[in-house]
Image (cartoon, rainbow, N blue to C red):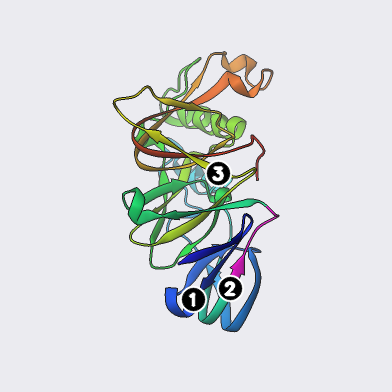
Amino acid sequence: MFTKVNSKVVSVDIGRSGPIVARKGAMLFYKGNVFFQPHQIAGAGMGGGMPGLGAMGGMAGRMLTGEHESTMIAQGQGEVHYGFLGIEVHVVDLGAVGGTIRVEASRLLAYGANLQASVVSVAPQGNSVGGGGGGGGLFGALRSAAAGVVTGQGMFTTQLSGPGSAVILGHGGVFELEVSPNKPPVTVDPQAFVGSAGQVNTNLRSTVSWRNVGRTGGEAMQLECSGQGIVYVQASEEKL
């Protein structure tokens, strides 16, 4: 579906592939009869799934999920070229990785509109924070949100499922790390984490107390990845 023009640009013939969803501002140029319109991922900007927030959920959800990138859908006949801020691109064939990937919205460049896209909570994956405990209700939700702010990982992530391809972004390029139950977990700097495919569990761990969060280096908080699948990591700790 997507063809890499170089390390920072992909092209796609939407007449053959069908409509393409991409982050707003990612279209570089196109040839043919193509038109664009706003698009929204299911559940984006939601407040649900934030236990204990109640009526605050809608506002807090939009502020803290991190899944707020505006997207556009391209339709028609023609070839569209996509890129973003000169950042390296990586094409993922979902069929080759079990049919599902989870990726931070800021790291997602484009994907086929035929894929099922939704914003899902990372909590069911076993997300936890050491060095102080999470707790339940509003306090626990705020602790999880604070961890997301510190590390760049929100409480929610974008999930893509089905046959097709997606393009993800990474400073310095993206490389794949295999995660297997027969091998030790893969531990990643949270700001270098891009996404995962398969049955990957992520646990956010810290060796410092919450009083010291923000006063230590990035190595103080780490994302432990276990299970079965692939973890996508960028060659940098730089945020998008």
Q: Which residue is label 1 attached to?
A: 14
Q: Which residue is label 2 attached to?
A: 80
| Picture layout, residue 101 above or below residue 220 | below
Q: Which residue is at 48% across, 44% downward?
A: 57
Circle 3 SS class: strand
Q: Which residue is at 47% across, 45% downward?
A: 157
Q: Quadrant of residue 36?
A: bottom right
Pointer 3: residues within 10 angstroms few (<14), some, or many (20+)?
many
Point out the tag, 2 or 3, that comes first from the N-terminus.
2
Circle 2 SS class: strand
Pointer 1: residues within 10 angstroms few (<14), some, or many (20+)?
many
Residue 201 horizontal/vertical position (percent) = 37, 33
Q: Which residue is label 3 attached to?
A: 174
Q: Which residue is at 52% across, 41% downward?
A: 175
Left or right: 142 in relation to 81: left
Q: Is residue 82 magenta?
A: yes
Q: Are marks 1 and 2 in contact (CB under 8 Å)?
A: yes
The CA distance from mark 3 to mark 1 is: 25 Å
Q: Is residue 216 magenta?
A: no
Residue 165 horizontal/vertical position (percent) = 43, 60
Left or right: 125 in relation to 174: left
Task: Name the amino acid, label 3.
Answer: Val
**Residue range corresponding to the magenta coloring:** 81-86
The CA distance from mark 2 to mark 3 is: 22 Å
Q: Is residue 158 visible?
A: yes
Task: Name the amino acid, label 1.
Answer: Ile
Circle 1 SS class: helix
